[in-house]
Image (cartoon, grey):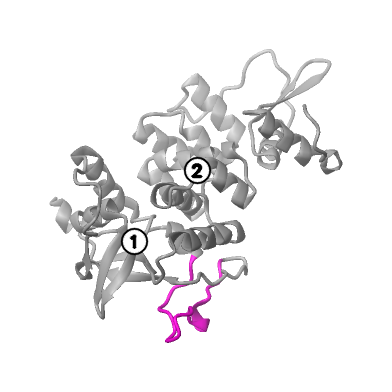
Amino acid sequence: MNASKQPVRRGLGRGLGSLIPSGPAAADGEPAEPVAGVRPGGQALAPVAGAYFAEVPITQIVPNAVQPRQVFDEDAMAELVHSIREVGLLQPIVVRRSGPEAYELVMGERRWRACQAAGLTAIPAIVRETEDTDMLRDALLENLHRSQLNPLEEAAAYAQLLEDFGCTHEELASRIGRSRPQISNTLRLMRLSPAVQRRVAAGVLSAGHARSLLAVQDPEVQDRLAQRVVAEGISVRALEEIVAVGDTGSAQRRVPRGKPVAPGLADLAERLSDRLETRVKVELGRTKGKITVEFASLDDLRRIVDVMDPRNRVDRPI
């Protein structure tokens, strides 16, 4: 079947587009009131000065005349085109108006070219009306902190802020109050197969399950395990065991011999991992148990200690 005849999927998430009101500006240059936007869960998006989100006809966009990148890797471009056909464009481009029905690219020429190759007629875009890049970046960072995004939307927003706006992992972590390891782990979700990404974006597969599947290189095996998780209700810890022992085909879970098994132990470990935002192991012996909490750095350890007991939040060396 000719790829050009296949229907092109719209994005499951809009990356930075999920963080910005949609609609044109009012006559005085301020964002229009009716398009402030509300995320699922009731959280309103703060207006972003000098910018709005829109679906722009792809033929009305011209590349930036001062674009420094002249060579686009063919293999990487083909991979991006395939991803757009499968799950849509998660990261909108940034444009500015150059006429009544004309736009000039500011950021995202590679995505714009890939969308043309994938057969899109319109492309998600942030229409910027200000030359102050720092103002736009800071406003988007604030909305990223306020909004309830699914893990794929969050990963796409992180990736775009890092690539388009030159944000560092440290800047992103400090501005939105999250740890660097959490940001890195979220970004890794973009490496999942398109089929698994769709399940994560739809909410049928948790971010914890998705991170476990990153250890599997084969996309088909990733998809097969994701199907098992949904069908059998497999916990994150059980999935880690399956991946560790290479049990990618059998529907029967393998339990290490010689160790007592308590009902709900894996679920308790999963809850601790989610609460502390790091990997937690809970082991039960014949006479006592053990909890192992992993951390990436001293700063990450301080963060975990603060979560465990907020009363210990004092500036002292560890």
Report whether residue 157 is seen: yes
Whether residue 232 appears in this view of the structure is no
Assign a secondary structure to mark 2: loop
Disc 1 crowd rating (10 Å Cα; few below 14, some 14-19, many 20+) is: some
Q: Quadrant of residue 279?
A: top right
Q: Residue at x 52, y 41 (%)?
A: 169
Alpha carbon separation for disc pair 2 and 1: 29 Å
Q: Along the polypeptide, which appears first: circle 2 or circle 1?
A: 1
Dominant secondary structure of the residues highlighted in magenta in the image? loop
Please name the residue that numbered disc 2 is placed on: 168
Front residue (pair 281, 131)? 131
Point out which mark residue 10 bears.
Answer: 1
State the extent of the magenta-drawn residues as a range. Answer: 20-39
- Amino acid on which disc 1 is placed: Arg
Q: Examine the rendered structure and indicate whether residue 211 appears above or below residue 36.
A: above
Q: Amino acid at mark 2?
A: Thr
